[in-house]
C-alpha cells in the first residue's frame, strides 16, 4: 500500500527550506538596494535607458559606416530629441548628454556605439538593481513553490500511513463472510441476469436501458455513442441482439446484404463501436469488494434497486435489498475494516505495522511537514 520513508527523494526537507531562506535573503538584499537608489528614480531612469537602447538596436546597423544617409540623419535627430525630453533632475542626465556628443558626428562607427554604451555603464548598474530584484523575486517564488509542493506530497504520504495504521488496527479475525456472502451472491446473480439480458434482448432495448442509467450517477455506465444509439433505435437491425450485431460487423458488405437492408450503414455505425458493445456488462450493477462505507453503500443500493428492477426479477432485487441492509443488520464498520485490511495489507506492511516502523514513518513525515509549514509561514508570498 505504501513504502517506507526514503532518506532522500530529490531535495530533502532541510535543503528545500535552506534554498528558500537563501532566496529570501537575496530578494531582501536586492529590495534594499532598490530602496537605497529610490524606486521611483530608478524606474524613471530605467524608462529612458531602455528607450535609448531601443534606438541603438533599431539604428546602429543602418547608421554606421556607409549606411543610408537619410537613416543616419533621422537617428541623430531622434537622439537629440530624446535628450531634450530628459527631465532636468534625472540621475546621470549628463551621461545621456555625453552620449549625444559621442554620436553627433559626420560618420558613425561601431566603436562610437561602444563608447556610448560605456558612457552609460553607471546608468546600467543602477537600472540593473530593478532587474536583479525581479530575478530574485522569481527565484524566491520558485523556491516557495517547491516547498508548498513538497508539503502537499508529504500530506498525501501522511494520509497513506494514517490509513495503513487504521487498517492495522482492524480485527483480522472478524467474520467478514457476513458481508462477503450476500454481496457475492448478489453479484453472481446480477452477472448471470445481465449476460442473458445482453444475449437475448434487442440491442435497441439494451442501449435504452444503459441510457436510463444516466439519471443515476452511482451506476457508472458509459453512455452509448450518439450515432450508435440513433442507428439501433431507427434501424431494423436494432431488433437483433448485441451479440448478433457484433457478428454481423465481422461480415463482408456483400454477405451482410443478405441479413440487413443497408449493409454499409451497419458497418459504419456498428463496426466502429465494437469495443464499446463488447464491454457492456454487469460491472456497474455490481457491489465492489471490499464494500464502501455505510452511507455510500446505502445510496448506491438505492440507485441500483431502481435500475436493476428494470431487467431483473424480484428475487434479485431482494438480494440487493439484503446488501443494502448490511450496515443495519451487522457490525458493519468493524467487518468492513477487517475486509479492507485483508484485501489491502500485504505481508511486508503487516510486518512493518507490527514492528512499529509505520508509526515511526508517520512521526518522521509529520515532523517534515511541520518544518515546511513553519517555512511557508515565515516566508509568505511576495
Image (cartoon, rainbow, N blue to C red):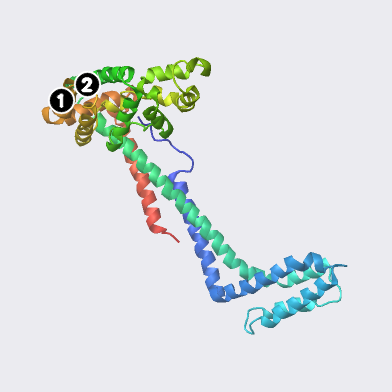
Answer few, some or many: residues within 10 Å of disc 1's Cα (few below 14, many 20 plus, some between 14 and 19): some
Instruction: Give the left or right position of residue 327, taking residue 53 as reference.
Output: left
Secondary structure type for disc 1: helix
Residue located beneath label 2 in the image: 186
Residue 372, image x, y percentages: 39, 50
Farthest residue, direction front: 261
Q: Nearer the viewer, residue 357 or 198?
A: 198
> Is 352 placed above or below 72 here?
above
* Quarter in which the C terminus is drawn: bottom left
Can residue 135 be seen here? The reply is: yes
Instruction: Give the left or right position of residue 98, taking residue 4 as reference.
Output: right
> Is 281 placed above or below 2 here?
above
Can residue 38 be seen here? The reply is: no
Residue 365, image x, y percentages: 35, 41
Query: Image quadrant of residue 170?
Result: top left
Distance, label 1 to label 2, CA atoms, is: 9 Å
Which label was assigned to residue 322? 1
Farthest residue, direction left: 329
Asked whether the residues under the numbered discs 1 and 2 touch, taking CB atoms below 8 Å apart as contact, a structural biologist would say yes
Dot placed on the residue nearer the N-terminal end, 1 or 2: 2
Which label was assigned to residue 7? none
Amino acid at each position: 500500500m505504501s513504502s517506507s520513508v526514503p532518506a532522500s527523494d530529490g531535495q530533502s526537507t532541510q535543503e528545500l527550506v535552506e534554498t528558500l531562506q537563501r532566496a529570501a535573503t537575496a530578494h531582501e538584499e536586492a529590495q534594499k538596494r532598490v530602496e537605497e537608489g529610490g524606486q521611483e528614480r530608478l524606474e524613471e531612469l530605467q524608462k529612458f535607458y531602455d528607450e535609448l537602447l531601443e534606438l541603438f538596436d533599431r539604428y546602429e546597423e543602418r547608421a554606421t559606416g556607409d549606411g543610408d544617409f537619410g537613416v543616419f540623419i533621422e537617428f541623430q535627430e531622434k537622439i537629440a530629441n530624446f535628450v531634450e525630453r530628459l527631465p532636468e533632475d534625472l540621475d546621470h542626465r549628463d551621461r545621456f548628454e555625453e552620449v549625444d556628443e559621442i554620436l553627433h558626428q559626420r560618420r558613425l562607427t561601431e566603436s562610437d556605439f561602444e563608447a556610448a554604451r560605456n558612457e552609460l555603464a553607471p546608468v546600467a548598474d543602477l537600472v540593473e538593481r530593478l532587474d536583479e530584484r525581479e530575478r530574485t523575486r522569481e527565484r524566491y517564488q520558485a523556491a516557495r513553490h517547491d516547498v508548498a509542493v513538497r508539503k502537499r506530497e508529504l500530506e498525501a504520504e501522511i494520509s497513506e500511513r494514517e490509513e495503513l495504521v487504521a487498517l492495522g488496527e482492524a480485527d483480522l479475525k472478524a467474520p467478514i463472510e457476513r458481508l462477503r456472502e450476500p454481496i457475492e451472491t448478489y453479484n453472481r446473480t446480477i452477472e448471470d441476469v445481465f449476460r442473458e439480458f445482453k444475449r437475448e434482448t434487442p440491442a435497441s432495448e439494451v442501449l435504452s436501458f444503459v441510457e436510463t442509467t444516466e439519471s443515476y450517477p452511482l451506476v457508472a455506465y458509459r453512455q452509448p455513442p450518439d450515432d450508435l444509439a440513433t442507428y439501433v433505435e431507427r434501424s431494423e437491425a436494432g431488433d437483433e441482439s448485441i451479440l448478433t450485431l457484433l457478428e454481423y460487423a465481422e461480415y463482408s458488405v456483400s454477405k451482410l446484404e443478405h441479413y440487413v437492408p443497408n449493409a454499409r450503414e451497419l458497418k459504419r455505425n456498428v463496426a466502429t463501436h465494437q469495443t464499446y458493445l463488447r464491454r457492456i456488462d454487469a460491472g456497474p450493477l455490481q457491489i465492489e469488494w471490499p464494500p464502501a462505507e455505510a452511507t455510500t453503500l446505502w445510496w448506491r443500493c438505492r440507485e441500483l434497486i431502481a435500475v436493476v428492477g428494470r431487467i431483473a426479477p424480484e428475487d434479485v432485487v431482494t438480494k440487493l435489498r439484503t446488501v443494502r441492509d448490511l450496515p443495519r443488520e451487522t457490525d458493519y464498520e468493524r467487518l468492513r475494516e477487517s475486509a479492507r485490511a485483508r484485501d489491502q495489507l500485504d505481508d511486508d506492511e503487516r510486518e512493518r505495522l507490527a514492528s512499529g516502523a509505520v508509526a515511526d514513518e508517520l512521526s518522521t513525515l509529520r515532523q517534515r511537514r511541520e518544518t515546511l509549514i513553519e517555512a511557508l509561514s515565515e516566508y509568505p508570498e511576495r
